[in-house]
Image: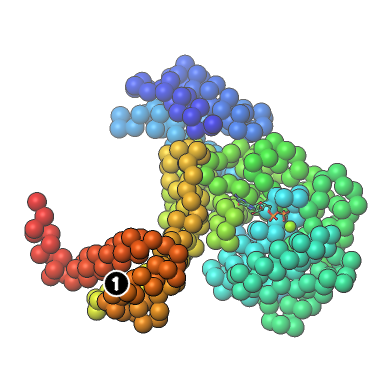
Amino acid sequence: NLSDKLDRAFKVLKGQGTITEINVAETMKEIRKALLDADVNYKTAKSFTDDVKQKALGANVLTAVSPGQLLTKLMNDELAALMGGTTSELTLTASPTVILIAGLNGAGKTTFTGKLANFLKTQKNKKPLLVADDIYRPAAIDQLEVLGEQIGVPVYTNRESKDPIAIAKEGIAHAKQNGNNIVIIDTAGRLAIDEAMMVEIEQVKAAVNPHEILFVVDSMTGQDAVNTAKVFNDRLDFTGVVLTKLDGDTRGGAALSIKSVVNKPIKFIGTGEKMEAIDVFHPDRMASRILGMGDVVSLVERAQMQFDEKEAAELQKKIRKNKFDFNDFFNQIQQIKKMGNMKDLMGMIPGVGKMMKDVDVPDDAFKGIEAIINSMTPAEKENPDLINPSRRNRISKGSGRDIQEVNRLIKQFEDMRKVMKQMSNPAAMAAMMKRMP
Ligand code: GDP
Ligand code: MG
């Protein structure tokens, strides 16, 4: 693990007041080893450590900053620069903007196609159309349709056709007719060595002249990812890279090497299987992540993205009037679930990523609660005070959960409501604070 190795490398410097030729050289040797282990290619790793060393030796060591901290900062900046320095956005000016998705089998193309459409729809106010251009497996078309349904984005398919070039063109015509200003074409996976398939995607490119060609690559495939990127770039001259499966524990090495080998920006990362598990690629955050600091900023952004301000104000009002009910409670749970699975989320917290590797967080942590709430009548959900013992029995039977579990949930809900009510009342809040020791 890269961050363990870096921890060790920094220990070499710990307690030393100044950066000298000797301690820097030793640390850089460790760091170079760590980078090589994380699939950064030798040339990149060597020039990186040489650069950092030069800068470190030239830097004024402020008394407030330890050499370790200074080096971390230098490395962070240098890594970010290596990965492109700044965030690289999609060019979305044309209408429709055509985006072609390419990559190997299983890289995460279809999943990303859905995530990108969802992102453009919810974050950029676009009206995307998906085109199912993977005609070799009927299941691939089904998969895209399911995702489209889930995110509320239309999918163009032509199950009769065996001609991906024609389907791509039909899809664009369909978008023009229906006012879709983005077309995302999901293609079949291909092995880089499969000449016929490589020719096919070149032909699709020539036929539709896409504004963006995104090469999707599984970040867990390490050095292979770099080789594949090179082959695809030679054939397609893509406009950007998507690194998938960067959940939790990272192998950031691929990000570094791909950028240095093909010199194309990484535009997005995939951090889970859900439709919301997509992040714009930020070189500086990725650098911190490679250095083991976790991607806190992305985590916060994702939380904000799910948090609808109007809804929140509405909720505030209900709480103040003590009208917070089981419907609201249920909605809150859905909000939490939308943020991704618990393991994905926790993996992004610094230090937790490592721990989470062996821990099993049930994705269905809310299943019991949901079942119980679903077994309530609309009147009960709106007015929990109605729920007397006989109703509790009925809910328990209906949901298949123990009566104790039902009682516990209702008790917890009532307690929560009380606290919420107090917190929303400034006077009560002040009184509560006074009572605190
Ligand atoms: P395709 O063959 O390139 O279209 O790949 P798919 O989109 O069908 O994805 C292959 C598998 O990888 C599926 O099981 C996805 O759920 C999974 N997958 C895709 N992206 C991610 C990601 O960012 N994180 C994780 N953990 N799994 C992913
Ligand atoms: Mg696919």
In the displayed structure image, the side of residue 165 where residue 384 appears, left or right: left
Image point (54%, 70%), residue name: 122
- The answer to which quarter of the image holds residue 41 is top right
Front residue (pair 28, 246): 246
- How many numbered circles does the render carry? 1
Alpha-carbon neighbours of circle 1 within 10 Å: few (<14), some, or many (≥20)?
few
Quadrant, the N terminus: top right
In the rendering, at what x and y percent does residue 144 appear?
70, 65
Q: Is residue 244 above or below residue 161?
A: above
Q: How is the image coloured?
A: rainbow
Who's the residue at 46% across and 61% down the image? 367
- Camera-side residue of 172 and 360: 360
User: Residue 301 lies in what quarter of the image?
Assistant: bottom left
Spot the residue most to the top: 22
Q: Residue at x 87, y 47 (%)?
A: 194
In depth, the one of 399 and 304 nearer the eye is 399
Q: Secondary structure at mark 1?
A: helix
Q: Is residue 99 visible?
A: no
Percent x, y of residue 248: 52, 44
Where 12 falls versus 133 (above or below)? above
* Coordinates of residue 288 in the picture (x, y in percent): 48, 41
Name above or below for residue 56 compared with residue 131.
above
Residue under label 1: 389
**In the image, is the residue at mark 1 within 8 Å of ligand 1 by its beta carbon?**
no
Question: For the residue marked with disc 1, what is the amino acid?
Answer: Pro
- Residue name at image x 67 percent, y 37 percent: 222
